Structures are given as structure tokens and as C-alpha cells.
Amino acid sequence: MVREALAALLGLEEDIRVVAQVARGDEVVEAVRASGADVALLDIEMPGRDGLAAAAELRAALPGCRIVILTTFGRPGYLRRAMEAGVDAFLVKDAPAAQLADAVRRVLRGERVIDPTLAATALSVGADPLTERERDVLRAAAGGSTVSEIATLLHLSEGTVRNHLSSCIGKTHARNRADAVRIAHDNGWL
């Protein structure tokens, strides 16, 4: 419903034409390839493949297509990961509708468009301090798994899992692993 509403809204603009819509992140590249779209509008949360992975795949497959992320998840870590994936614009859904059409026009001119409040927050929070393995361990811990269960799931020793959890707690300045999960999630690192 939201996708269709955004397409209808953009379709009202005289100089913008919506040429394709897909419901899944793993359909993005083929839809852009088939339609010849100049700009792809993605969300962070998409079934099949999240918007960040879809953006990276699209950038690699069709580097001339501009990529705009429009999401409710205005978290600094998501912004950083989006920029690393080659996204041209990152906006949050609570922005005025006219701002989206303007962003589409601006990225077509070669500009980068970033929500200014989110950009300031991202700069103040800093880069993601966690390693990929630490993020894996925190994701596993998020479900309430024990150290033993995490070790089995990730093919690690229990001591290694404890070391990673301890490191995550220290790097996020958390009180415990549940707090580390929350902090990492709130910052878009997970």
C-alpha cells in the first residue's frame, strides 16, 4: 500500500514517471534492468533481500542507476551502510512528500541527498565499532540464546563467544549483553 501510494505521488510530478514497482529486494536489479529506470527507490526493510543488500547489488550490476533509500529506520548505522553500498540519497519517511520528488531530481543531477538531522546524528555517534563476527554474536544473542547455543550456532567455542560478548558490551558502553543488543540495534549496526 505504501509503495503504491509513493508511486502515485511521484506519478503526479510532471517530470517524473514511475516505470516499475516490485515488492521484494531480490527483484530490484531485474526490474531496473527490464524497465531502464534511472532511479531506484528502496526501503531498508524489504522481503527477499533488504534494501541495503539490494542497493549494493544494484550498484554493482547497473552503476548508472541512481539509488534513493526512503525508510522509517533513520539510524546512523543504516546511513553509513547505505553510503558504503553506493546509495545516492537517504531520506526518512516523515519528510514532506515534496522532498522526495526533489531528491529524485537532485540525484539525477549527480548530487547526494542526505536527511540533515540524520547526518548530524551519524557524525556524533561515529562509526560502527563492532566487527562482523561481533555483530553475528549479538544477532544470535538478541533472541535470548545462551552462550552454548550461540557457540553451536556460529561454530565457535564458548570462550570465544564470551570474549565477543564482552567486547560488544565494552564497545557499546552497555551494562550487559541485552543492553548491547539494544544499543547496536538502535544505532543501525545490526
Image (spheres, rainbow, N blue to C red):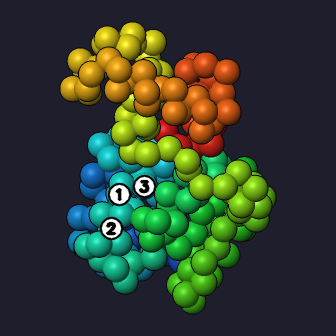
Please provide percent x and percent y for residue 131.
Answer: 43, 45
Residue 102 shows up from this direction: yes
Report the amino acid beneath label 1.
Ala
User: Dot 2, how many residues are within 10 Å of its Cα: few (below 14), some (14-19), or many (20+)?
Assistant: many
Please provide percent x and percent y for residue 126.
Answer: 66, 55
Please provide percent x and percent y for residue 19.
Answer: 39, 70
* Residue at the image position 36 percent from the left and 63 percent from the top: 56
CA distance separating discs 2 and 1: 6 Å
Q: Secondary structure at mark 2?
A: helix
Residue contact at pointers 3 and 2, CB within 8 angstroms = no
Report the amino acid beneath label 2.
Leu
User: Dot 3, how many residues are within 10 Å of its Cα: few (below 14), some (14-19), or many (20+)?
Assistant: many
> In the image shown, does 190 or 52 lie closer to the viewer?
190
Q: Quadrant location of residue 96?
A: bottom right
Q: Earlier in the sequence, mark 3 or mark 2?
A: 3
Residue 4's place in the image compared with 115, above or below, is: above
In the rendered structure, find residue 97 and report the number of the disc placed on it: none
CA distance separating discs 3 and 2: 10 Å
* Residue at the image position 50 percent from the left and 44 percent from the top: 130
Residue 36's place in the image compared with 41, above or below, is: below
Residue contact at pointers 2 and 1, CB within 8 angstroms = yes
Q: Which residue is mark 2?
A: 58
Q: Which residue is mark 1?
A: 54
Residue contact at pointers 3 and 1, CB within 8 angstroms = yes
Report the amino acid beneath label 3.
Leu
